[in-house]
Image (cartoon, grey):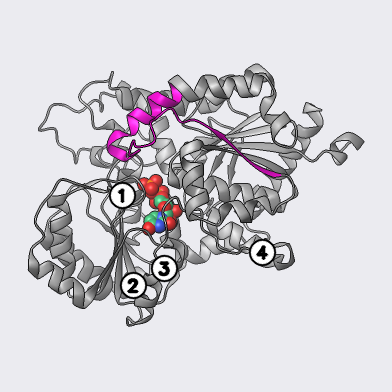
């Protein structure tokens, strides 16, 4: 490294898609880079930044690192917009109309660097906001794309043109056989069905904006300098091998939450004083931890559908009956604004919940999953939740809602990893009841054994010498060498 780059550490601009799960995993990445002495500017939407300041210790924690700055940009939506999954397209449109030109202006004018501690030498941007690649090319700053989905889902996205070419997409009318194979996704021919494709593929018309968007954004990733995936090589070998034939530099550095924990525990002296790990946009209700303390070991089913899922009241009632009838204690996260519609709650459900259930608005999920009383996770199969469950050795029942979740749940279930049950496309109380019993009782040992094996591989990958550990070191060296070129 030359003299100049030694005196000016590299500065990475991290720019997530503005929803909880992307902000969370990219803040973890930011912290890992800070640990390596890299300066970071983290670009949050105004809306999310206000929530983060209100409900988490992230600001205090992150700004403790030398050279760390938060910057903000509008996401283009009014403050009272719910930013939920059912209206996610509006967020994409607003980003394109409002955020895109603002970001360009920020970078072209060098205003961002001037206001936040120095010039940016590398951009790490969310891979579903490829307008950042245009801007990076225009200003001559290397850009790395970060996709927060699994490698398997990224590969399925990548194969959408092949699925269309093979006539497997679009859907063939309303009564199409959703169990027919999606054989154009190489490496998954033997188990992937049309039903397991990313939810954006459930269309009858190829001009559908959602399908167009994910297809284009995924193909554009090949223009970035490299791709970061929050996974580890041993988990998704096949999909990664396929991706690497199209994108030569893929940094698999996950599971990021476990990776961060490992690196921090190796150097406790450099830890920031506020050690709450929270990056939450909602207030965490910690009372659930005391409730968990009062429950028997591995007895509780933890239920959460993530940060943007919306369920109908009918679905909620089916889940509720299923949980109550299973006879197992349950901890259920019901986020504000996450249930659509009004319905009277049957008294028998409220009464049974007083005895065996605990319902809260938002929890410290990593801590909940790590709690010994939790025996399993009824999840929407978001990628972060899936990784967090694996590392905590908790088998899953999967009820995918949209986006990448249909793919993840296929992998979790019997077809591939065998660490849980896939409940996709059904939502009735009998199935819920049976699956909860199967997970926590009937097939408990079998699931615990397989998820334990996977957790061991995950933890090994983020320890010194492990695949993700080495890949992160390699990426850091790469970022440092970009610094020499930019100067
Ligand atoms: N999460 C949390 N508390 C909750 C529910 C969720 O901290 O009560 C976190 C969870 O740990 C995960 C993220 O929110 O990191 C959800 O991300 P995921 O990819 O699973 O789903 P998404 O929200 O994108 O649908």
Eyeballing the image, is 192 above or below 171? below
Badge 3 is on which residue? Answer: 286
Magenta part of the protein: which range?
68-96
Q: Distance between the residues labelled 4 and 1?
A: 41 Å
Q: Which mark is residue 375?
A: 2
95 relative position to 337: left or right: right
Q: Distance between the residues labelled 2 and 3?
A: 19 Å
Residue at image point 66% right, 42% down: 69
Q: Name the residue under label 1.
A: 410
Frontmost residue, 376 versus 103: 103
Mark 3 vs mark 1, CA separation in Å: 32 Å
Q: In this view, does 113 lie to the left or right of 81?
A: right
Within 10 angstroms of label 3, few (less than 14), some, or many (20 or more) residues? some
Tell whether label 1 touches label 4 (CB within 8 Å). no
Q: In which quarter of the image is the N terminus?
A: top right
Return the mark for residue 222.
none
């Amino acid at each position: 490294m030359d003299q100049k780059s030694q005196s000016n550490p590299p500065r990475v601009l991290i720019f997530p898609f503005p929803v909880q799960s992307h902000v969370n995993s990219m803040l973890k990445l930011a912290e890992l880079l800070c640990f390596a002495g890299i300066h970071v500017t983290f670009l949050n939407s105004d809306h999310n930044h206000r929530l983060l300041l209100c409900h988490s210790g992230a600001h205090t924690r992150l700004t403790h690192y030398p050279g760390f700055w938060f910057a903000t940009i509008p996401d283009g939506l009014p403050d009272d917009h719910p930013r939920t999954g059912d209206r996610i397209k509006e967020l994409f449109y607003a980003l394109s109309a409002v955020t895109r030109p603002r970001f360009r202006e920020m970078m072209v004018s060098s205003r961002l660097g001037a206001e936040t501690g120095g010039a940016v030498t590398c951009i790490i941007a969310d891979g579903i906001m490829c307008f950042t690649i245009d801007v990076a090319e225009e200003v001559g700053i290397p850009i790395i794309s970060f996709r927060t989905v699994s490698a398997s889902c990224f590969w399925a996205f990548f194969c959408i043109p092949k699925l269309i070419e093979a006539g497997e997409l679009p859907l063939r009318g309303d009564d199409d056989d959703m169990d027919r194979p999606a054989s154009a996704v190489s490496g998954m021919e033997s188990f992937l069905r049309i039903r397991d494709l990313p939810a954006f593929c459930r269309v009858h018309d190829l001009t559908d904006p959602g399908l167009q968007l994910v297809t284009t954004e995924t193909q554009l990733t090949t223009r970035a300098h490299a791709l970061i995936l929050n996974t580890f090589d041993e988990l998704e070998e096949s999909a990664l091998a396929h991706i690497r034939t199209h994108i030569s530099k893929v940094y698999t550095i996950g599971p990021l939450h476990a990776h961060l924990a490992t690196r921090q525990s190796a150097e406790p002296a450099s830890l920031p004083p506020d050690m709450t790990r929270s990056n939450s946009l909602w207030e965490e209700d910690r009372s659930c931890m005391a409730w968990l303390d009062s429950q028997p070991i591995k007895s509780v089913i933890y239920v959460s559908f993530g940060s943007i899922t919306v369920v109908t009241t009918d679905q909620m009632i089916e889940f509720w009956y299923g949980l109550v009838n299973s006879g197992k204690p349950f901890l259920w996260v019901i986020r504000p604004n996450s249930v659509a519609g009004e319905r009277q709650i049957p008294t028998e459900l409220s009464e049974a919940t007083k005895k065996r259930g605990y319902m809260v608005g938002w929890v410290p999920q990593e801590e909940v999953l790590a709690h010994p009383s939790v025996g399993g996770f009824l999840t929407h199969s978001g990628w972060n939740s899936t990784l967090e469950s694996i590392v905590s050795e908790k088998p899953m029942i999967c009820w995918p809602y949209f986006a990448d979740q249909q793919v993840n749940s296929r992998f979790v279930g019997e077809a591939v990893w065998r660490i849980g049950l896939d409940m996709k496309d059904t939502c009735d109380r009998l199935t819920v009841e049976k699956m909860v019993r199967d997970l926590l009782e009937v097939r408990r040992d079998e699931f615990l054994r397989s998820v334990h094996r996977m957790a061991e591989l995950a933890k090994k990958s983020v320890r010194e010498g492990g695949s993700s550990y080495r890949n992160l070191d390699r990426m850091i060296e790469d970022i440092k060498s970009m610094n020499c070129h930019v100067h």
